[in-house]
Image (cartoon, rainbow, N blue to C red):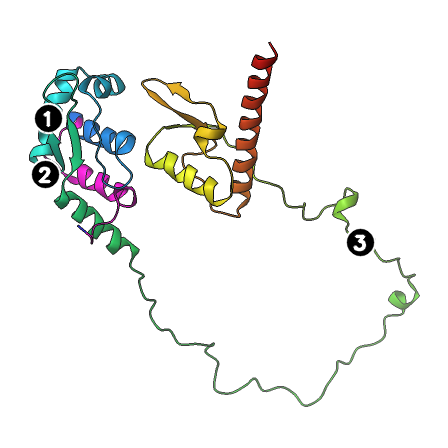
């Protein structure tokens, strides 16, 4: 499987494969997509949530979830290793065939389409325009214009003094917070970027929050913005504000 890309890089292509499979009904597709988007491992796509956890998230009974998993398994989208008892949950993992199809879709989409060669320059007529050899125009002088007093030059247009002009560049506006469950690829993307920037990771700077059945963190976006962009600088500012608020709460607790 060395030629297969990590699951986080082919997740969208894997989901497209599920969408295009007409043998999957709505319930089967929702269960398979939920596993891929919420619980899948960053590299392999493997996960092991219980039927009750999946059912609570999707509003389905555990038995309905169990039946729905049969279809993506039969269609070779998932490999299901069923648990033996309540303490040993079933394990789900994308099949090698599904990962190969997703990898092929990803690589085909990454190919650069060469542009057709076009003729450079402009098309001009072979001969220039025939102009008269006599220069200038013949017209009588305008005495009224010569006697009219000259007006003073207009004042320069200064943006800094309330006049029109290009406003100075502003930083990106703050974005609403997004919940990212702990342990999924989005949380790892944040931790990798923060480590590259020499900043503390999510679990060391932000409080662990609970959102429904999941534990995770509230962050400025599902994924970090490109490095050096105004959006990334704004995300770092928001993270520092969140970390500062958490530190302030801890100080108040210790003081109390």
> Image quadrant for the C terminus?
top right
Tell me the SS state at disc 2. loop
Q: Which residue is mark 1?
A: 82
Tell me the SS state at disc 3. loop
Give the spatial CA distance, label 1 vs label 2.
16 Å
Q: Earlier in the sequence, mark 3 or mark 2?
A: 2
Residue found at x 80% / y 54%: 156
- Determine if the magenta segment contains residue 13: yes
Please tell me which residue lies in front, 77 or 2: 2
Please state the extent of the stretch shown in magenta in the rendering: 2-26
Q: Which residue is mark 3?
A: 156
Residue 76: which disc? 2
For the residues bearing labels 3 and 2, Cβ distance under 8 angstroms: no
Q: Nearer the viewer, mark 1 or mark 2?
A: 1
Q: Nearer the viewer, mark 3 or mark 1?
A: 1
Q: Earlier in the sequence, mark 1 or mark 2?
A: 2
Find residue 74 and report its image quarter: top left
- Determine if the magenta segment contains residue 117: no
Name the spot of residue 123 as percent of width and height, x first. Answer: 45, 78
């Amino acid at each position: 499987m060395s030629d297969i890309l990590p699951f986080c890089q082919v997740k969208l292509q894997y989901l497209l494969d599920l969408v295009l499979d007409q043998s999957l009904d709505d319930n089967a597709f929702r269960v398979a997509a939920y596993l891929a988007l919420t619980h899948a491992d960053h590299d392999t796509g493997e996960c092991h949530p219980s039927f009750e956890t999946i059912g609570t998230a999707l509003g389905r009974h555990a038995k309905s979830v169990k039946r729905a998993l049969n279809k993506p398994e039969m269609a070779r989208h998932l490999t299901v290793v069923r648990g033996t008892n309540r303490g040993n949950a079933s394990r789900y993992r994308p099949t090698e065939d599904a990962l190969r199809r997703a990898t092929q879709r990803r690589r085909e989409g990454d190919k650069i389409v060469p542009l057709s060669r076009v003729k450079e320059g402009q098309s001009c007529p072979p001969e220039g325009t025939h102009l008269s050899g006599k220069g200038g125009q013949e017209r009588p002088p305008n005495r009224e214009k010569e006697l009219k007093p000259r007006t003073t030059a207009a004042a320069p247009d200064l943006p800094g003094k309330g006049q029109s002009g290009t406003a100075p560049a502003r930083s990106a506006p703050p974005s609403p917070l997004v919940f990212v469950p702990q342990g999924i690829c989005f949380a790892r993307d944040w931790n990798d970027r923060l480590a590259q920037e020499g900043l503390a990771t999510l679990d060391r700077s932000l409080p662990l929050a609970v959102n429904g059945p999941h534990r995770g963190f509230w962050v400025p976006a599902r994924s970090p913005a490109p490095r050096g962009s105004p959006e990334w600088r704004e995300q770092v500012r928001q993270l520092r504000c969140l970390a500062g608020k958490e530190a302030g709460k801890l100080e108040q607790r210790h003081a109390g």
